[in-house]
Image (spheres, grey):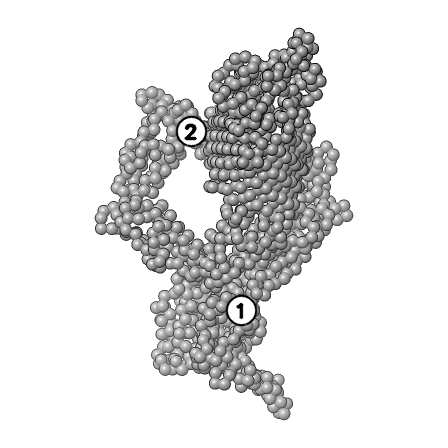
Amino acid sequence: MSAGSLIVRSTLFLLVAVPSFAQVARYEGKQIARIEYQPSEQPLAAADLARFQTLSPNEPFRASEVATVIDALFATGRYSDIQVDVRPEGDRIVVRFITQQTDFIGHVDVLGKIANPPDRAQLVSAARLDLGAPFRPELLDNAQKQIEQLFVANGLYEAKATLDTSEDPHTQQVSVNLMVDPGYRAHYQSPAIHGDTRLPDQTIIKATGWRVRFISRWRQVTESLTNTGIQGVQRRYQKDDRLTASVALQGQDYDPGTRRVQPQLEIQAGPKVQIKAVEAKVSKKVLQRYVPVFQEGAVEEDLLVEGARNLKDYFQSQGYPDADVTFRRLPVQNDELTIEYVITQGTRQKLTSVAIHGNRYFSTDTIRERMFLQPSSFRLRRGRFSDAFRRKDQETITSLYRENGFRDVNVSSQVETNYGGKSGQIGVTITINEGAQWTVSNVTLEGAPESDEQTLLGLIASSAGQPYSDVSIAADRAAIVNFYRSEGYLNAAVDVSPSPAAAPQQVLLAYRISPGEQRFVRDILFSGLKATRLSYVKNNLFMDNQGPLSFTALRDSQRHLYDLGAFASVQAAVQNPGGTEAYKYVLLDFDEGRRYALNVGVGAQIARIGGTTSNLTAPAGSTGFSPRVSIDLKRLNQWGLNHTIALQTIASTIEKKAALSYLWPRFQNTEGRSVTFTALYDDSRDVTTFSSRREEASIQVSQKLSKPTTILFRYAYRRVTTNDVVIPALLVPQLLQPVRLGIVSASLVQDRRDNSADAHRGLYNTLDVAVTSKVFGSQRSFLRIVGKNATYYPLTRNITFARQTTFGAILPFATPAGLSETEAVPLPERLFGGGNVTLRGFPENQAGPRDLGTPAGPGGTATSPTGFPLGGNALFFNTFELRFPLLGENINGVIFHDMGNVFHNLSSLSFRVSQRNLQDFDYMVHAVGFGIRYKTPVGPIRLDLAYSINPPSFVGFKGTLNELLQCNPNIPADQLPSACRGQTQNISHFQFFFSIGQTF
Amino acid sequence: MCRIARTLVAALLVTLPGSVHARAEIVDGVSVVIGTRVIKQSDIDRDIRVVSFLNQTPPDFSARSRKEAASRLIDQLLIRQDIQSNGAAPAALGGMEQLLMQIKKDRFANDNTQYREALKRYGLSDEDLRSALLWQLTVLRFIDQRFGSAKAVSEEEIEQYFNSHRAELTKSHPAARSATDIRPEIEAEISGERANQQFETWIDQTRKDARIEYREESLR
């Protein structure tokens, strides 16, 4: 190296390296002319930028200040690079911040054919692109990898996925489009099974469920089926008592030539595990329930110890308070590992007394209702006692007192054997030493603005004179924090310092509040909306632009939007959540649900639906079969406003129905209010006597008054036609003419049941009042009231007592000339009853008055009686049911008593139990019976067998319609064909019903 | 010589715009990004100056030196994050004052004027140096508390260490005839090595877990 080049290099070193300090030092203290930003549109809100920029024009330049600003700007999370340069301008300098912004993840859309599984949601989830999180290009590579893995797990080995992005420079949101082409789905083939299996390969393959039974065809690969298959093998080993068996999927080999996947299974069967109880009799079911080895599939020490503890509690709860349980593990012999639980039961005892002493502040009943220990009673023959329960009760009582200011409370218990001098009886005495009650002397709030004080004092439970307890303080702290967080103070904190007051047992409470910095909504950004109107979404938000940022409001908005039913998913997030800026974008990302929903159903009804117009031999109905097809088509989210147009059609041999409805939810933007317009055509024959046709238009307004209570107002204009009437008396033209009815009705529904499909507690009330009158365009006038009250009482965890009473009445008024009060009500509008949901002593709609051969018109001669039901103007039904477990988890039993009937009118309603004569139907029919309920996800499948104690007898006709028409009432009886003479018939004592859902 | 002159002129032309203020000059900016935290050019400059001051060497602002400083600062930032997340307290101010007094005494004979002039030469303020010293002590305490092994050093380890470092140990402790003679010193050495090893493993893993982005232009 020459001397010259050395000099040059040294010079260059000095010239290049040293200026970094020299340059900055040169500007130190110079006056700033102005501050510029490149690009001029910065990602921060103007208010935030002004807050973080501490350099000011006309102030001296400080390099340390520049560093502070860079740190502050970068901490906002909205910048990926910041450089600051300076240029002279006259005597002053211009400072420029050259920035690059951070992008954030926005909407992720899936385009192309989606071969479910994986469905759209699974694909989006697999991409792991979290809404509002900072976007980095490498996230796309990771997303692609994850999606490809998801495809492979679902047998889509030839699937292709590509991702592209588009950016909104104003909001820094990056939308991601995921384009998928799933290709063909592979099928399974016989798995390769390795390890010590102890089962034939065929048994293992059968347990996987990967091959269709009987036809031996291999199924298509899905992740869910693969997992189910592995679990199936595991269960198969458990069935053989091999509780420690391990079944692992080592891999799946794909053959592209045949498009088949061979799973590689590694199995270690392990020994058979026998868990026995010695020195006491314990069923296998009880062992399986209380020894967690069976649930966990592992024989570990801690699980065995837990099993011993559970069994001890079990025996104590069964009346063995001195029960002791230990276990021992025997060496493996003949492929069998035996665990023996050694149970020393001790003497069986009955808890006859639970005495509570020393309580003054709380009543004994208040304490008892919180306790597990219970003395023997009708429900609990031996009472409920165990050491664990006793300890738990002591803790519960202690907590109860502490929560109410008794900080020094002491609760002890004593168990007395041979209680009352009788062996086998025990008594427990709970002794409470309450101590003094501490109360709050005064409450002060520090750190809160004065304007908030009254609000905060209203929120907190602690106040002067109130009991002092940690629970109340924790609740107060949570209430204050929630208040500030809902106002955008996301890091609000409260410190509570209690100190003794001057008076004894009194405490001064000081709440020190640190609200922290307030955050605001910069803007709400919506993504994923295609058909739904933005205005509709905005109307359903609980937060405003520029308002305080509250996560509570954000979560409520998200939940509310999802509950509207227009979206398959609603995601809510804050853009750049960890950033320090005060004004933040709130993101709402939607996945709109399907626009159309089509349901097609094919089925059949099997019931007592007999009684045709050509055969009148079964006025009480006979078992019939009716095939049925239903098609429902819905257009969802109509106009982008979440309105629904629905067409429902049913076609069967006994019913033809079409209903077109338009549902407008959240009418007038009111929560819980909806309006429904309906046009209906219904031609049905659900009563054996006649068929009816209804053409109806209606409007209904529904308003939810509270969570359990809804009120409905309805106006219906209907044209009712009675067809296929089997009774000559009703063939009077006036009665067969179509009748127009204008009905105004109101319904109140109160539903406090725990589960509407299978209630165990709560109540269900309905009251429906309807008026038809000329005023409403009606040709007939009557008032109809139907009320129902049902209550449910849990007797034990599994046994429920349920009851229901139904009352209904029709009161005609302004009766047209020539018609009786009964005739004034069109046949299809009368009250009918009997059957599986009202009174199981009758077939469907067979209760109440029947045709006695009514005179055809005033003064006319009575026709032959047919015995067909005619309905009535009053009804009363009462049902008692006892619901209990019968077999396993899924089969329950019911015993019931039903009583009631349909009556001619309100004045003829009677609680009489016997039928006076063959023309008397106004009495209470009683039925008792037994039912079985099989639990399914759509509610229980129900089979009821009823025995009617006092079913009605009546005179009925047996013959065809033509034969009936030959029975001229003007011909003397002895000259009439023999078929015209009515025959005494009766409703069968035995009835059976098969349906879905509980009776009520 | 003519060639040298031409090269000099060329070099001056290259750097001239920066030195005669004709154009805007970068005065600070982001050099390294670690999550939502940054190491700035000014941080690197300050670190180089502090290290040079303490080592009594001229400050080296070459690209290599800047990268080394950036690497040191990355480690420090990761340590700082760990300290903050675990709520560890900084070192006591007293320790820092003691260390500073020692520097003043050793290098400037307790002459504050000399001390301030030296600082000025390195482009540092008294506060810069105090912060740096306090931070160094905090880091040392962090390593000691976080990685100082509670595990006792066995006799076998002490013997093994003595045998493998016999030459150095007998040189530094001439009176030592066996491991037992200098047992506390060897124990401290082994514990220190263990702590260092654990610290190295931890910092390597933390660096791998952290998302570190370099702005190469600003490190040249």
Q: Looking at this view, is A385 or A875 the one in front?
A: A875
- Amino acid under label 1? Gln
What residue lies at 41% left-to-right and 74% top-to-bottom?
B129
- Identity, as a three-letter code, of the amino acid under mark 2: Ser
Vertical side of B166 occupied by A765: above or below: above
Q: Secondary structure at mark 2?
A: helix
Q: Nearer the viewer, mark 2 or mark 1?
A: 1
**Can marks 2 and 1 be said to lie on one chain?**
yes
Judging from the image, mark 1 belongs to the subunit labelled: A
The answer to which image quadrant residue A872 occupies is top right
Pointer 2 local density, CA inside 10 Å: few below 14, some 14–19, many at least 20: many
The answer to whether residue A865 is above or below residue A891 is: above
Name the residue at the top extreme.
Answer: A974
Q: Residue furthest right?
A: A257
Q: Secondary structure at mark 1?
A: loop
Image location of residue A122, percent across then percent down: 62, 49
Tell me the residue at 57%/55% (across/down).
A534
Q: Residue at x 45, y 82 (%)?
A: A30
Q: Position of residue A73 (x, y in %)?
A: 49, 68
Which callout, 2 or 1, points at the residue further toward the start of the chain?
A: 1
| Residue at 32% in and 48% down | A462
Q: Which residue is mark 2?
A: A317
Instruction: Name the residue tied to disc 1.
Output: A42
Q: Position of residue A931 (x, y in %)?
A: 55, 24
Give the answer, above or below, for where B73 lies relative to A21: above
In this rendering, does residue B31 appear at all? no
Lateral position of residue A380 relative to residue A541, left or right: left
Label ID, residue B100: none
